Image: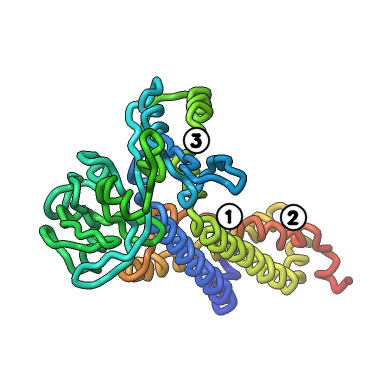
């Protein structure tokens, strides 16, 4: 490392330039990773907070043009659960709890109007409390004719406990305010199943009455038992993370952001390779002198890679610190996740890719001909 450190000291401007480039790429990548996490959470946090072992999706009561019932699929848009399916799941061995949740997005009016995600659950369900925690105001208990709103929804609508809101033409009383949970970029408002059925125009008779969009199931079933229950009820199940694919916007949004992250990782490696390749070519005669004096090729390679590691570490650290500060500010106004996964992981990724790139760039060091030091070609 002696030679590498000496080069850094004698060519501060050159190494500051590459360090700055690495720092800027790190800044962009950490910010983009935090934004990806924040947007993902604003799409799915309500589903994650339900702490379900599996979500159950059904085909509902709709029929195809030829009169057949469509196949159930993992889709919050197309899914529907009937009373019969819910009762069958509740009676399945190993199922501890199977709660129907009706989900729809609509315009809600209070002192002002806003779009919200309506989650309809049975009267007396503890699901809102389990998902969002203790009520900030009022109660988390769901009763007929009431809603429990998230903090953001309460602020957007300008309402509090005891006020009334209009949801799809229904006048409902605000019974409580809970910490924020989000579904498809909309704050969640909890209400009872009856209000959801009216809002979603969910009609049916007897056992075929729609009681929700999905079932949130908690239990100790093995894979074979889950599959058997699916066949018995004409439903499909998905883990919490797997259920995210049932959100229309989630896959495309996340895919686009992850693609941009991939490009930035690739760019960081290319920047490192380009700089070190040019630097190695410029040092060819100096390296030849060292080879002529007996320096081993492996020693020179280790020295060059060590030099790259120092430059990358400084650039990555500076970029990460800047991104952490900017991310903390951004989180006040946009969905942004700031934690170890969104800061340290991308920083480590850039450093590792940079090191791998440096191994490609400095391979010339081991093959420099010592005769160049004597004026040979």
> On the rendered image, what quadrant is the N terminus found in?
bottom right
Which one is nearer the viewer's eye here, 280 or 333? 333
At mark 1, the secondary structure is: helix
The tag on residue 281 is none
| Residue 352 - label | 1
3 or 2: tag closer to the N-terminus: 3
Determine the CA span between mark 2 and mark 1.
Answer: 23 Å
Give the residue number, with chain letter if any, for mark 3.
235
Report the disc number at residue 297. 2
Quadrant position of the C terminus in the picture: bottom right
Are the residues tagged 2 and 1 within 8 Å (C-beta)? Answer: no
Residue depicted at x 69% and y 70%: 274
The earlier-in-sequence mark between 1 and 3 is 3
Residue 79 visible from this viewpoint: yes
Locate residue 105, reporting x and y percent.
37, 59
Q: Is residue 178 left or right of residue 243?
A: left
């Amino acid at each position: 490392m002696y030679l590498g450190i000496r080069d850094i000291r004698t060519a501060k401007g050159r190494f500051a330039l590459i360090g700055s480039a690495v720092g800027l790429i790190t800044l962009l990548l950490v910010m983009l990773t935090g934004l990806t996490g924040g947007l993902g959470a604003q799409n799915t946090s309500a589903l994650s907070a339900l702490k379900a072992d599996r979500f159950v999706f059904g085909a509902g009561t709709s029929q195809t043009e030829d009169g057949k019932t469509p196949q159930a699929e993992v889709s919050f848009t197309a899914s529907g659960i009937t009373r019969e399916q819910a009762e069958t799941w509740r009676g399945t061995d190993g199922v501890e709890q199977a709660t129907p949740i009706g989900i729809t997005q609509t315009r809600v009016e209070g002192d002002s109007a806003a779009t919200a995600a309506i989650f309809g659950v049975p009267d007396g369900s503890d699901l809102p409390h389990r998902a969002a925690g203790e009520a900030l105001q009022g109660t988390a208990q769901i009763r007929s004719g009431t809603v429990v709103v998230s903090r953001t929804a309460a602020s957007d609508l300008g309402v509090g406990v005891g006020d009334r809101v209009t949801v799809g033409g229904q006048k409902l009383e605000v019974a409580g305010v809970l910490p924020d949970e989000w579904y498809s970029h909309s704050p969640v408002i909890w209400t009872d199943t009856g209000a959801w059925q009216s809002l979603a125009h969910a009609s049916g008779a007897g056992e075929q009455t729609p009681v929700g969009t999905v079932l949130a199931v908690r239990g100790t079933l093995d894979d074979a038992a889950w599959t058997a229950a699916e066949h018995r009820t004409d439903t499909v199940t998905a883990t919490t993370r797997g259920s995210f694919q049932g959100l229309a916007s989630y896959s495309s949004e996340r895919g686009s952001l992850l693609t941009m992250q991939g490009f930035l990782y690739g760019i960081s490696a290319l920047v490192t390779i380009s700089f070190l390749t040019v630097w190695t070519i410029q040092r060819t005669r100096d390296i030849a002198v060292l080879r002529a004096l007996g320096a081993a090729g492996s020693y020179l390679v280790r020295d060059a890679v060590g030099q790259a590691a120092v430059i990358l570490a400084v650039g990555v650290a500076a970029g990460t610190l800047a991104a952490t500060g900017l991310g903390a500010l951004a989180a006040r106004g946009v969905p942004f996740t700031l934690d170890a996964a969104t800061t340290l992981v991308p920083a480590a990724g850039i450093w590792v890719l940079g090191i791998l790139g440096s191994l490609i760039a400095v391979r010339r060091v081991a093959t420099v001909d010592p005769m160049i030091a004597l004026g040979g070609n």
